[in-house]
Image (tube, helix red, strand yellow):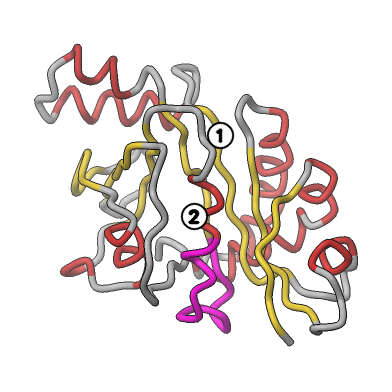
Amino acid sequence: MIYSVVPMSEADFELRLEEAVSLYITAMKYNPAIFSGRLTEWAKQPLLPGFTAVGAIAHPEGVSPSEALDDPRYPLIGIGYCRTGRDTYWWHRQVRAGMASSGWPLRTISTLLGNYAELSEIHIHPDYQGKGVGKRLLRELISGREEAVVLLSTPEFPNEANRAWRLYRQFGFVDVLRNFHFNGDSRPFAVLGVKVPHDSVTGAADGNSAE
């Protein structure tokens, strides 16, 4: 089996939705009880402005990536999606409040959050982490974005010593907030950003779910 990273249309995303949410829960080590709620939330995403998604599919060499994407017999091993940031989104309001309380100048906050893409999700199945899947997903998600910057949030990790952090740093993501707590989550998060358009990078680091 090989794997391919392919853009996902709205129909592709719908076809693979349950599988994608299951992958997300597995990669993030979440309680499976959240499946129904996450499924409902993910189903809304393709309707939002600027939505783009990419998937990584494992398949035999004799099967094309597009055929594999349409055939549920071939597993989804990675998923990621972006959307254009909006001030009506919960994530936006949380980050804006965090930046203000951290001392960011109001004009800088307004500029940064006035034209950005939110990298909402990027997850790799544990069996395929460390194989370059995350790097390929992230490159596809960032390439071609029309916004000025891509922002994401990821859980803090001691010394940034996990694959997700290595991947983001390799792509040039820099700190916006550190040790930030989103409402309803006890874990500390970092908010990171990178300017776009973004040049491709080289190297072997692979991203996983922000564990």
Horizontal placement of 130 versus 105: left or right?
right
Check disc 2 and report its element: helix, strand or loop: helix
- Label 2 belongs to which residue? 139
Callout 2 amino acid: Arg
Q: Nearer the viewer, residue 44 or 78?
A: 78
Label count reads 2
Q: Is residue 173 magenta?
A: no
In which quarter of the view is residue 94 placed?
top left
Q: CA distance from mark 2 to mark 1?
A: 15 Å
How many neighbours does mark 2 have within 10 angstroms: few (below 14), some (14-19), or many (20 or more)? some
Do the residues under discs 2 and 1 have CB atoms within 8 angstroms? no
The magenta span reads: 123-136
The residue beneath circle 1 is 83
Residue at x 62% of width, y 55% of height = 34
Residue 119, position in %: x, y?
47, 43
* Residue 10 place in picture, x, y as percent: 79, 41
Task: Name the quadrant of the N terminus.
Answer: bottom right
Sequence-earlier tag: 2 or 1:
1
